[in-house]
Image: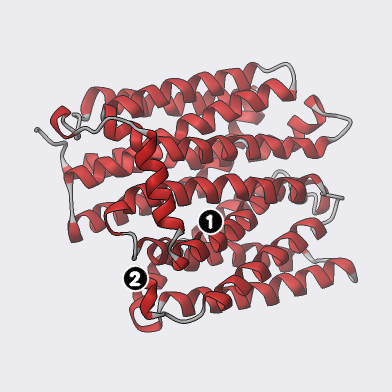
Amino acid sequence: MKRLHEYEFIALTAMLFATIAFAIDAMLPALSTIGAELSPADPNRAALVVGAFVFGMGVGTLFSGPLSDAYGRKAVILWAYVGFILGAVVAGLAPTLEIMLAGRFLQGLAVAGPRIAGLAMVRDLYSGSKMASIMSLSMMIFGLVPALAPLMGQVVMNTFGWRSIFFAIAGFGLIASLWIGLRQPETHPVENRQPMRLAPLISAAKTAFANRVYRFSVAVQVMLYGALFSVISSIQPIYDITYDRAESFPLWFGLMAVLAMPASYINSRIVAKTGMRRIIQTTLIAQCLLAALSTLLTATTGLPFWVFFVWNYSVMLMVGFTFGNLNALAMEPMGKIAGTAASIMGSIGTVLAVVIAMPVSLAFDGTPMSLTAGVLVCAVAGLVLMLWLGPRRPTDES
């Protein structure tokens, strides 16, 4: 099989992963405008534009892996981009919020293809330390997208109107699909493919949830995904309405994303010595304290902007110091079903996180109260679960 040059493959992989971040973050500057135009009686419902996408992604994540095993990585990714582009067009032309949400759900359902099949493609071609290196470089490039996407979305919105953001997202998907379609050979040959069957998926789920560490890791990830998606769906209205910083929002969001990038690297340097469970627990304790302080200030004197920004930044740091560790913790005892177990974990974590995040976003009252309190509840619940999990036991391997 002829391979792409390593640098081109890294860039292509980064673009596949970045599709999710661009589809979410590019349209954040338009949330207030979408709410005012399509849901004037309840502008907070605009946050559902994020929730519908994330919910669709969670559902799609459960099936993308088995589909790519059965039909090949490239075919799944290309068909997924067809759905992704169609969903973006539907959202961009939608006369009502309900039709827009249907388009966003379709986008999320489809984007799971590049997310999961792209990762499988890397596994097909590389292994061991080389795979880790490829993934690290791809994720480093991917990390720039959340920093740039809101600014790009705002430029497009200010120039062509808010609906054009969805067509820009469709254009992003079209470029990615043409790139992989014209340049990347299939990495999963026909002789290695496995028919898609429901029974193995159910069996793997039963085996995974029979393991105590896996159950707790999934539960904690649900809480942390809930906190993260609460922030993503609420942050733009807070910048706009609470702090009157709608125009500068993309710059602040970009700064926060850039400052948070080293967290995963720092975690990788300290995890062997400190341990995954201890890092997760320590991070959650810090977040409980910061979220409690922010909630208290919001309820009494009001939350100054710089305190809100620092606290918001701490949530991004929490992601860097917990998500990788939780995934590794859950996958460690999974053995041969690690791939399916990872899909199940990602799907459940994403879908249930929407159930948490959407009420937080819809409860926005012009202050950060619903967000700080919501994140506080998630952090406390996550910490309680980690303390309940406790230190490593001999039975954790089975």
SS of the residue under disc 2: helix
Q: Is residue 16 visible?
A: no
Which residue ends up furthest to the left in the rendered image?
1
Which of label 1 and label 2 is nearer to you?
2
Q: Position of residue 298 (x, y in %)?
A: 84, 66
Q: Position of residue 132 (x, y in %)?
A: 25, 58
- Residue sitting at x 75%, y 57%: 371
Above/below status of 163 relative to 138: above
**Is 310 in front, or is 159?**
310
**Is 193 in front, or is 6?**
193
Left/right placement of residue 189 relative to residue 328 reads left
Q: Are marks 1 and 2 in contact (CB under 8 Å)?
A: no
SS of the residue under disc 1: helix
- Residue designated by label 2: 397
- Residue sitting at x 53%, y 48%: 348
**Is 252 in front, or is 62?**
62
Identify the image quadrant of residue 292: bottom right
- Residue designated by label 1: 257
In which quadrant of the rendered image does the C terminus lie? bottom left
The amino acid pointed to by label 1 is: Ala
Above/below status of 176 relative to 231: above
In which quadrant of the rendered image does the N terminus lie? top left
In the image, which disc is placed on residue 54? none
- Residue sitting at x 35%, y 29%: 77
Q: Position of residue 185 (x, y in %)?
A: 18, 29
The amino acid pointed to by label 2 is: Glu
